[in-house]
Amino acid sequence: MTGKRKSASAGKAPARSAAAKKTSASKRPPASPFKRRLRKALKWSGITGLVLALLGALSLVILYRAIEIPNPNADFQTETTYVYYADGKSEVGKFATQNRNSIPFSEMPDSIKAAVVAAEDRSFWTNKGIDPKGILRAAFSNAQGNDQQGASTITQQYVKILYLSQERSYKRKVREAIVSLKLHRQQSKEQILEGYLNTIYFGRGAYGIDAAARAYFAVPAKKLSVRQSAVLASVINNPTQFDPANGKANRDALKNRYAWILNGMAKTGEIDAVTAEKAGRKLPKFPKVKADTTYGGQKGHALALIRSELVRLGFNEQEINGGGLRVTTTLTKKAMDAAASGVAEARPQGVKGLHIAAASVEPGTGALRGFYGGQDYLESQINWAVSGGQPGSTFKAFALAAGIKAGFSLKDTFDGDSPFEFQPGVKPVRNLGGGDGRDYGRVNLITAAEQSINTAFVDLTMALPDGPKDVLKAAKAMGIPGSGPQSLNNLYKSPGLQPNPGIALGSATVSPINMANGYATIANGGVRADLHVIDKVVDRNGETQYQHKVTDKRVLDEDVNSDVSYALERVITGPGGSGFRAKGLGREAGGKTGTATNSKDQVSSSWFIGFTPQLSTAVMMVRGDGDDSVEEVLPGTYYGGTYPTLMWTSIMRQALEGEPYESLPEPANTDGDAPTDGHEFVPPPPKETKKPKPPKETKKPEQPSQEPTTEAPPTSEAPTEEPTDEPTDDPSSTPTDTATPLLRQEWSPSAWRRGRP
């Protein structure tokens, strides 16, 4: 009985519980419309997401089956990039992809295999051709605004190079990923790495590891050391940036990446930590490797400059060397030949370590038409037309422009006495001429320009509303880049260009190309055109990938510019003008001489920059590393008015041969509201007129002798004496107009040098 009762009781309990639940549920309030909509949205979102995921997976399956591994690019090794002069027909040179020597995997040292994996794809041995984690990591890093990161595996890079194209599109990326997955299934990791190392570009025109080993270290790939392997693995990422031959900044960048790769090799167990630490202390030695003869002479400098510009415009190294591009530059063969021939004709001979640079820019377009980069490219890869030096007094043109723009006139006067004192503790500025320098008294801007008077231009600078800042602003507006770190490529920066009181004296580093473009603004009536070297780039399919558009801007009023132009014209034509030798051109021209000194107060650079309406050319002469003394090797003839002016004249004569003669503008003699007082022109008092003296009583002439006389009859056309001193841009020894008759004679640099120091 007891057992039955328990059983009945146990059976009823669940019934009561269910009833209670039903009652409880019936008392709940119905769900709100918002919650019902939310649940419905979540439900359909989940269904939609599932459908999309299934469709995506199905699409990948379809694409995987549809996309086959294509045949390797049959023309890969023959797609040379050609570089042309401005006519689009004459060839400057080419960037070829032929420098390749494929070697088997067994000949590749383990060090290069490990280094490349550490540098480019540390998951290479385990991934399936693509790296989803790497893709996500790169996407998040790029989205956060960090440095752009790539996510391509070694397999993907190999596929892109050998099987696909350099097209920038999502379609190509999808094909790349699918072909990489298929290639991973069809080839071993060793085969893929072998193909990659025989295909990838390492810089210096070298495709494949064997060519790279010879290009950088003059050894075959099988003899590469761990340190050499780490260097070659480093340059794959950016062959231009990490090539130590491109300058100190590039070498420093290489060293950082080199150490990172060695550390990666240690982390993966390929080398031990001690070896990595020891190897990372310094880079291996880079032997002098004989460059390809196709880069001989100035051609190598031209091709190196064009390559650098293509990279700046967004073309990568493999597009340049193997993309079959057709590059039309702004260079003309006539101007390039004129630069080389003009320098050779008038340069000083037999001076060791002397570097000459020249550059010609077309006013109105900013096109670099010709340049001379220095010695043969095979001897030195430094292009001094790009590297530059201190322009010295040639920078006074920008102070002159700033002054006239601010309201001063050519008649206004400035302090020409030496030295010019600032406040205590600041080194005073002096004129040349020995001791504290030559005193000139008050001089107007024309005289200051003609005779290159330092103190007058410093006085002008300090009289401007914003002082040196106004000179800096004028220089930038007229085409001179702002300051930047010192390097061998100063085409888009001017290291050391700061608004200091002596800015007009040119102590910053500026390239001759940029100085020529700055003066081209004056030649173009005060309208600056942006400098450019590449006009057009067409890909191998005939599609235009880049087309330059001339961008110009008026930076000086026409009247202001006319006065600046006139003052610079007087440097050549005026009495005592330091650039008088440029009269040998036989055309109207303006220009400015200049020298700069090093820390030992020795002249270390010498310039002449001048222009006609059609062309602006700068010539620079430096020595050693660009800061060595020039006056030591050219005593008495190191000024801008000597060799640089002679070279400029020879270059311009050849470059402008056959061109029409054009005139420079007359001075406008603007006279605005001067920003400061005390500079007005004060005419000298009139001279007192002397009363004529009564005529002296003349004696009765004696009877002439019948003997013949040897004395010449008096004449008003007696010849003047030739000047014996060497005209320079040193105001203490400026030439007088007695030099003018000489300049009307046929000009010859060899004749000028005969008998001279």
Image (cartoon, rainbow, N blue to C red):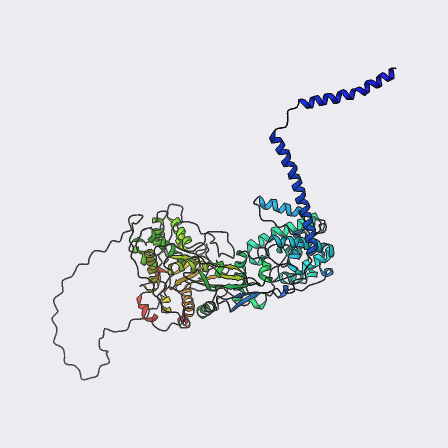
Identify which residue, 157 or 740, lies in the foreground.
157
Q: Quadrant of the N terminus?
A: top right
> Vertical placement of 692 versus 49: above or below?
below
Q: Percent x, y for residue 672? A: 29, 51
Q: Quadrant of the C terminus?
A: bottom left
In the shown orientation, is residue 569 left or right of residue 195?
left
> Quick one: which residue is furthest to the top in this view?
1
> Vertical placement of 34 versus 624: above or below?
above
Identify which residue, 230 or 12, lies in the foreground.
12
> Vertical placement of 26 versus 600: above or below?
above
Q: Percent x, y for residue 184? A: 72, 54
In the shown orientation, is residue 680 left or right of residue 331?
left
Identify which residue, 514 or 165, lies in the foreground.
165
For residue 378, say whether it is visible.
no
Q: How many marks?
A: 0
Q: Percent x, y for residue 493? A: 48, 54
Q: Percent x, y for residue 618? A: 43, 62
For residue 558, say whether it is visible.
yes
> Quick one: which residue is furthest to the bottom in this view?
706
Q: Residue at x 37, y 47 (%)?
A: 466
> Vertical placement of 188 versus 1: above or below?
below
